[in-house]
Image (cartoon, rainbow, N blue to C red):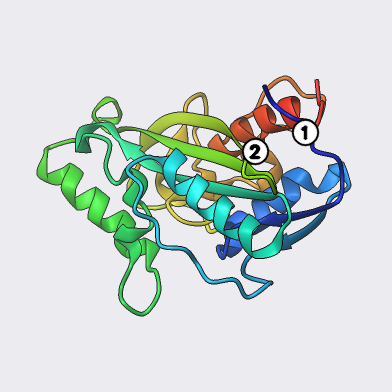
Amino acid sequence: MTRRLEPGRLVLATHNDGKLREIRGLIGPFGFDVLSAGELGLPEPEEHGTTFEENARTKAMAAMQATGLPALADDSGICVDALEGAPGVHTADWAETGNGRDFMMAMRTVEERLRALGATDPAERRAAFVAVLCLAWPDGHCEFFRGEAPGHLIWPPRGDLGFGYDPVFVPDGHDRTFGEMSAAEKHGWTPGDAEALSHRARAFKLFAHDCLGVT
């Protein structure tokens, strides 16, 4: 059974500026005083989970235990059908260089692997962005909200909006990439709207319904 989260201080368990910007934009209308793990100088916990849920819980629990406040974490990634779901939970790892993250390199790696398989038609390049939100309460109770956005991958990348793999992902029903969409268009959802487009917005919509009482 889900609990109602009343407006107040909330920690976003992320050091990713792109995720912070998107989640702050989504939760902004609800009156929370939002702090991020990065802004608070909290260390990033090691993520050894094999699912998005496990990694989201790791991050949410670490932020909650360090602050004593409710903490909301996101673990997300892109799952490519032809690559048997990879990079999946290792989405960010594919961008690691040893000196930070290079998502152009990561997108190129995905493209090279698809070409090696001869996957050139959109039907052979199916993929889905997945986001799992975990809300950790100060007593250790956790709740999960999962959103998925199906689509296909294109090459070369298009658009300089968004972050991560957005420039190569075209969601179903659209002809532009997430990288070509404004934040409002990419999410496709505000309180009271019926639809949500992005994986993160779809997960947040479930969170807003169950924990914030949004219908």
Residue drawn at 53 percent across, 71 percent down = 43
Circle 1 SS class: loop
The dot on residue 187 is 2
Query: Crowding at label 1, few (<14), some or many (≥20) Cα neighbours within 10 Å?
Result: some
Question: In the rendering, at what x and y percent does residue 55 appear?
Answer: 44, 48
- Observer-nearest residue: 180 or 107? 107
The dot on residue 190 is 1
Which kind of residue does numbered mark 1 sit on?
Thr
Label 2 with label 1: CB-CB less than 8 Å: yes
Q: In this rendering, is residue 185 above or below 19? A: above
Q: Quadrant of the C terminus?
A: top right
Residue drawn at 68 percent across, 72 percent down = 40
Q: Is residue 215 left or right of residue 40?
A: right
Residue 36 seen from this side: no
Q: Quadrant of the N terminus?
A: top right
- Observer-nearest residue: 45 or 99? 45
The quadrant in which residue 52 appears is top left
Residue 39 seen from this side: yes
Q: How many marks?
A: 2
Residue drawn at 27 percent across, 36 percent down = 85
